[in-house]
Amino acid sequence: MSAQPAQPAQPAPSVPPPPGIGAGAGRRREATHHLYLAVIVAAVAGAVLGLVAPGTATSLKPLGTGFVNLIKMMISPVIFCTLVLGIGSVRKAARVGKVGGLALGYFVVMSFVALAIGLLVGNILHPGSGLHLTKALAGAGHAQAANAPAEGVDFVLSIIPTSFVSAFTEGQVLQTLLVALLTGFALQALGPVGEPVLRGIGHLQKLVFKVLSMIMWAAPVGAFGALAAVVGSAGVDALKALATIMLGFYASCLIFVVVVLGLVLRLGAGVNLFLLLRYLAREFLLIVSTSSSESALPLLMAKMEHAGVSRPVVGITVPTGYSFNLDGTMIYLTMASLFIADAMNVPMSFGQQVSLLLFMMVASKGAAGVSGSGLASLASGLASHKPVLVDGIGLIVGIDRFMSEARAVTNFAGNAVATVLIAHWTGEFDRARATEVLAGRLPFDAAAFAEEQAAGTSEGTEETEGPEGTAGTEPVAAGEPRPAAVPAQPAAG
């Protein structure tokens, strides 16, 4: 039998490169890399100026404050767009409830773990021994107690905005979350009638991320002003005198992130923590510069979705975690309480320590990831549960900004890990894409991400049955990584 002549190979179809992969994207990545380096240089320069000329450095505080305010301006729009688009495209409300329930359960467990680590390190170091409290310092504690977050019924009522628009104008994360949930469920109930609204919100999201990418170019200026003011106001002497509690707190946060979160992420989702931290390196730099994990919230939401976490999981887990998953704040409250008790020579039994910290764990849930909220939570907890210790808060005010950096970094890492875990447990995690992204083969690009999300919204979603019987959108095949996406990542972003 004669052999059939070989057929000429058919040329592969021409496929346009996905957004963010072409030459233009390469130039954008090069520019944002330079911006990243500029933030590092600016942060170092600010710290040096704070040591050399503290008076001048302190006057630069408005630069850091202004940059943080610009970022906070975008938080409500990012949360609203992401959550509404996520819920609106899901046809089963039970799926959203499952994500929220798992997230809250996980947050409670990790809060207990963080408290335990803080108790262990604090009782070993006894960081407040040998310090003395002056009358001037005693007054600072009562001033902080007046700024305490709402508790109990007041906290619940504070989640309800006075109007639909005030949730955005007042910058309250939980109020925005409530409005976004109600809007998303309403669009979900409307079905096809609500699709034009979803498409409009998709285009709004594209605009929001574009504005965010523009703001990030001011990161070097913000980092310079913020760190210069912090170092200039605290001074070297204050840092030396309180080095023990600072180092102990940093060590506790490091143990929690590397050991606890690393093991949980590896065993719970099979993901390498260090790859995730490297992926979010620019966000960590932004947080260190501003001492606020809230400054990186919009970028965290975008990058988690880019890394293969579904939009509903990102939209629910990240904003909720910023009020209920404050692992760094838990460690801080523990060690600061023990530090003050030692410094004032008011020893607490183990039972008293546990009782106080459980009370603080509940009270602190009203504190968002804003710089200084941890100190206010500490003051309110001591004022309500152990009033005699309130005077001692003045001992820690001087270095709270430095501790706030470690607090914010730990909170941020905890929320990033929580998002991956919840997505994995609910079958909403694209592992193939995550592998490509964390390996650096699908770099994050904000402009491309916004374009992809807007295109996906305008095309609509196809209902499928998820891995665990949950309804979902049509998944991307394991061998077909989606286009590179998410907020055009400047410097700390």
Image (cartoon, helix red, strand yellow):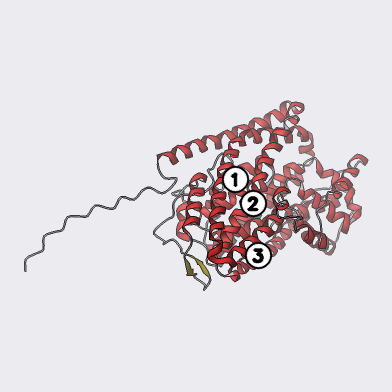
Give residue 30's position: percent from left, percent from top: 47, 37
Circles 2 and 1, Cβ within 8 Å, touching? The answer is yes
Q: Nearer the viewer, residue 431 or 343?
A: 431
Q: Is residue 267 visible?
A: no
Lower sequence index among marks 2 and 3: 3
Give residue 66's position: percent from left, percent from top: 69, 37
Q: Which residue is mark 3?
A: 106
Give residue 269's position: percent from left, percent from top: 54, 63
Who's the residue at 55% across and 43% down the image? 210
Label 2, label 3: how far apart the Cα atoms are: 15 Å
Q: Which residue is mark 2?
A: 412
Q: Which residue is mark 1?
A: 283
Circles 1 and 3, Cβ within 8 Å, touching? The answer is no
Please, what is the three-letter code of the amino acid marked with disc 1?
Answer: Glu
Q: Which secondary structure lies at badge 2?
A: helix
Farthest front residue in view? 193
Lower sequence index among marks 1 and 3: 3
Please, what is the three-letter code of the amino acid marked with disc 2?
Answer: Phe
The N terminus, quarter of image? bottom left
